[in-house]
Amino acid sequence: MEDNKKIEKLSDLLNASGPVKWINAITLYRSVVFPVLIFLIFTNRFDVFKWMLIISFLTDAVDGFLARKYKANSILGAKLDSVGDDLTILAAVVGLAVAKMEFLKTHWVIFAIPLSLFFIQVIGAFLRYGKLSSYHTYLAKTAAVFQGFFMCSMFLFVEPPYWLFYATGVITTLELIEEIIIVAVLPEWKTNVRGLYWVIKGKNNGSVNLKQE
């Protein structure tokens, strides 16, 4: 499956072999369904929205598991995964803004801090690499799990588990701070960077040529 790592554009999937095609299709689902989620929000169809949002979060877990299981990792897959994750979170936040505005007003600081850090990270990545980062650090994967459970709980329950809300805010903030530092110290765009510790370890060993998986 080594050639699959060279897949960088959607057109490259036409010549791809093995399960990489349908695994990337699962990943692409999150981006494709984003406008549908937005439409459901503004037509007040939260009864459908919440289940489609849950499916989007589930595909994030499924495609990652399948990519590792079948060794179908690719540059395109990493990019699609990052974009799909961001769009899913954006749809969830828009849904909260429409359906749970009082909750947002009450706890706006906890939302504002990671949101501000996210924009700093995005701007930094574009200035550094000319495109979005796609690190997929261990901390980012952990934050994604917490974000998924929290966002879905907001639409499934009248009152969300507050411990989950605060834990999600803290972990997401730490994850974004780590990524901002990685942008500052990692000179080349890389995917599947395990975390800041490994970046610094690579620099101390005289190499930052981290493996792309």
Image: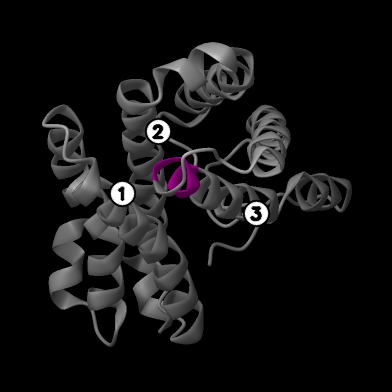
Residue 13 screen position, x and y as percent: 19, 69
Q: Which residue is mark 2?
A: 131
Residue 139 within the segment the image draws in magenta: no
- Work out whether residue 190 can be spotted: no
| Gap in angstroms between the C-alphas marked 1 and 2 | 31 Å
**Residue 168: quarter of image:** top right
Q: CA distance from mark 2 to mark 3?
A: 23 Å
Residue 48 vs residue 36, the one in the foreground: 48
Dot 1 or dot 2: first in sequence order is: 1
Q: Quadrant of the N terminus?
A: bottom left
Q: How is the image coloured?
A: one colour
Q: Is residue 31 above or below residue 64?
A: above
Which amino acid type is shown beneath numbered disc 1? Lys
Say the numbered circle drawn on residue 50. Answer: 1
State the residue at coordinates (11%, 31%).
Answer: 43
Which of these two is toward me, 41 or 114?
Answer: 41
The amino acid beneath tag 3 is Thr
- Residue labelled with disc 3: 142
Mark 2 falls on what kind of element? loop
Which of label 1 and label 2 is nearer to you?
1
Among the 4 quarters of the image, the one containing residue 17:
bottom left
Q: Which residues are magenta?
A: 151-155
For label 3, the SS is: helix
* Magenta region, main secondary structure: helix
